[in-house]
Amino acid sequence: QVQLVQSGGGSVQAGGSLRLSCVVSGVMYHAWCMAWFRQVPGKEREGIAGLDSDEVPTYADSVKGRFTISRDSAKNTLYLQMTSLRTDDTAMYFCAVEYGGSWCRGNMPRGRDYKYWGQGTQVTVSE
C-alpha cells in the first residue's frame, strides 16, 4: 500500500526559505516518478517540480533557480527546498508519486499522470 505523508510548510516572509518533506512508503524509489504540485483556490493544480528514477529533475519556470527537488532513499523521503520565496508562491503544496521511473523524464508533471498523493501542506508567504 502506497502512502505519502507530508510535513513542513507554514508561514514565512518574502525572501525566506522553507523545506517540505514527503515520507513515502510502499514504493521502490528506482521505479517511480515523483513530483511536487501546488494549488491556490480557484486555480488548477500546477506541477512545479518532478524527479525521475535517475534523479533527473524538471522544474517549472516559475520556480526554476529557487526550488530544489530531491530524495533521500535511505529515509524514504522526497523533499522540496524552497528559497527566495515570493508572495505568489503562497499555495497548498502536494507531493505525488507514480509507478515507472522514466516516463516522466524531461516532462513537466501533470496531475492526471499521478495516482498517489500526499495530504497537502499550506505555504503562506507574506510581504
Image: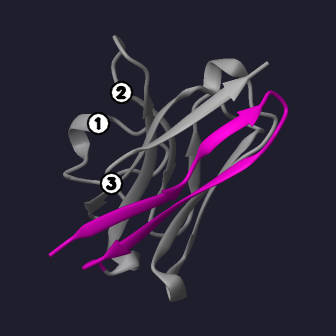
Q: Residues within 10 Å of mark 3 (few under 14, many from 20)?
A: some
Task: Tell me the CA gap for discs 3 and 1.
Answer: 12 Å
Q: Position of residue 8 (x, y in %)?
A: 57, 55
User: Which residue is rendered at x = 57% and y = 36% of the image?
Assistant: 123
Mark sitting on residue 118: 3
Asked whether disc 2 touches disc 1, contact meaning CB atoms under 8 Å apart, the reply is yes
Camera-side mark, 2 or 1: 2
Q: Position of residue 18 (x, y in %)?
A: 70, 49
Q: Is residue 58 left or right of residue 34?
A: right
User: Which residue is rendered at x = 53% and y = 88% of the image?
Assistant: 74
Q: Position of residue 66 (x, y in %)?
A: 76, 39
Viewer-closest of 95 and 123 = 123
Q: Earlier in the sequence, mark 3 or mark 1?
A: 1
Task: Tell me the CA gap for discs 2 and 1.
Answer: 7 Å
Q: Quadrant of the C terminus?
A: top right
Q: Which residues are magenta?
A: 1-27
Q: Which residue is mark 1?
A: 111
Q: Earlier in the sequence, mark 3 or mark 2?
A: 2
Q: Is residue 67 left or right of residue 13?
A: left
Disc 1 element: helix
Overall secondary structure of the magenta section: strand
Q: Which residue is mark 2?
A: 45
Q: Residues within 10 Å of mark 1 (few under 14, many from 20)?
A: some
Q: In the orientation shown, which residue stands out farthest toward the top?
A: 42
Q: Position of residue 94 (x, y in %)?
A: 40, 45
